[in-house]
Amino acid sequence: MNYGIINLNKPAGPTSRDCVNQVAKRFSNEKVAHAGTLDPLAQGVLVILIGPAVRLMDEIHELDKEYLARFRLGCTSPSGDMETALEEVPIPEGLEEAQLLDAAMRFQGEIEQTPPVFSAVRVDGKRAHHAARRGASVQMPSRRVSIYELELMDCHLPEVLFRIRCSTGTYIRTLGSDIARALGTDAVMTELTRVRVGPFTLESAIPLEALPTPVPPEMIFSPASTAMQHWTQWVVDDSVMRRILDGQRLASQEVIESPAGRIAVLDSKQVLRAILKQFPDGSWRCAKGIAHWDILPRA
């Protein structure tokens, strides 16, 4: 049984699902999934979950993300990128880098975004981009997202390059368009590279074409606990782990302190097996079993 995370360097072109399918071919009878979709035209870090690690999808979605995004001002398109036909729009005369910086800084912090219709957001239970490609009208719901850092890396107008650190759910092409509109024009995203998802960086990512067949797990896997580095982690002995995985409640004095009210529980071999949650009465109980004894037999 394989259990771990592959930090994959997705190339531009294939969909995230295509990448999962390519990885899945190397693992027979294993669950394989990805956490955090990248559009086909985007490249960079794609977190691939193998075996019991697929149960960590929600927790990995919470991790902050970092991108390098290039935009072209004076253009617009239905998709907000190069996927659909471009249309030129006017750029204010005499636009300078200082004005661009000033506009960009207004979008730091918590902002409201309306995702593009060419996106994987579900509207009435269906992916918005399916309806958009049919030419149907789609009313996209807005959402609150956080832009933690926004740095202008290069500016040769009309081309600009930003480094963006943001919360999950942020649409980078929408951010570029919103900044341009604040200047009285519009923009399309021409390149996007995800350089980090939480602790998973582009520097340590494995190119899709470099994945060996078969895959030696010790060569490319990160342990599932890597994704939980920002959590309180608790290493317990077998007797306590069995109580947790059997769903028994633990008194507050039996558990280490965690201000967040949740704990990643590892066994004595540093294998992540469960997530504990604190209840209003102060007791703790397993909120999610990740890897049970029958999934990973004891040595």
Image: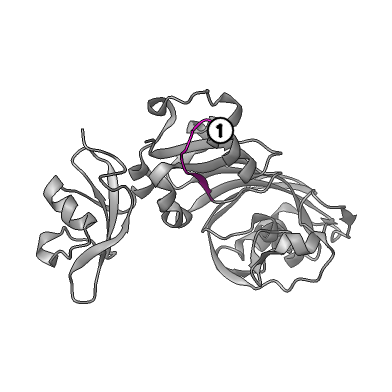
Residue depicted at x 18% and y 51%: 241
x and y, in percent, of residue 215 in the image: 47, 26
Would residue 153 be seen by someone viewing this image from the given angle? yes
Residue depicted at x 24% and y 40%: 270
x and y, in percent, of residue 176 in the image: 70, 57
Secondary structure mostly seen in the magenta stretch = loop
Tell which of 171 and 250 is nearer to you. Answer: 250
Tell which of 295 and 141 is nearer to you. Answer: 295
The magenta stretch spans which residues?
Answer: 26-35
Q: Is residue 239 left or right of residue 273?
A: left
Does 246 lie within the magenta span? Answer: no
Please tell me whether residue 92 is drawn above or below residue 214 in the rendered image: below
x and y, in percent, of residue 10 in the image: 60, 37
Residue depicted at x 39% and y 39%: 4
Secondary structure found at label 1: loop
Does 29 lie within the magenta span? Answer: yes
Please tell me whether residue 224 is drawn above or below residue 134 in the rendered image: above
For disc 1, the neighbor class at 10 Å (few under 14, some 14 to 19, many from 20) is few
Q: Residue furthest bottom?
A: 281
Q: Quadrant of residue 24?
A: top right
Residue depicted at x 52% and y 23%: 213
Q: Quadrant of the N terminus?
A: top left
Give the mark count. Answer: 1
Would residue 177 be seen by someone viewing this image from the given angle? no
Q: According to the image, label 1 marks what residue?
A: 25
Q: Is residue 251 left or right of residue 120?
A: left
x and y, in percent, of residue 266 in the image: 24, 46
The amino acid marked with disc number 1 is Lys
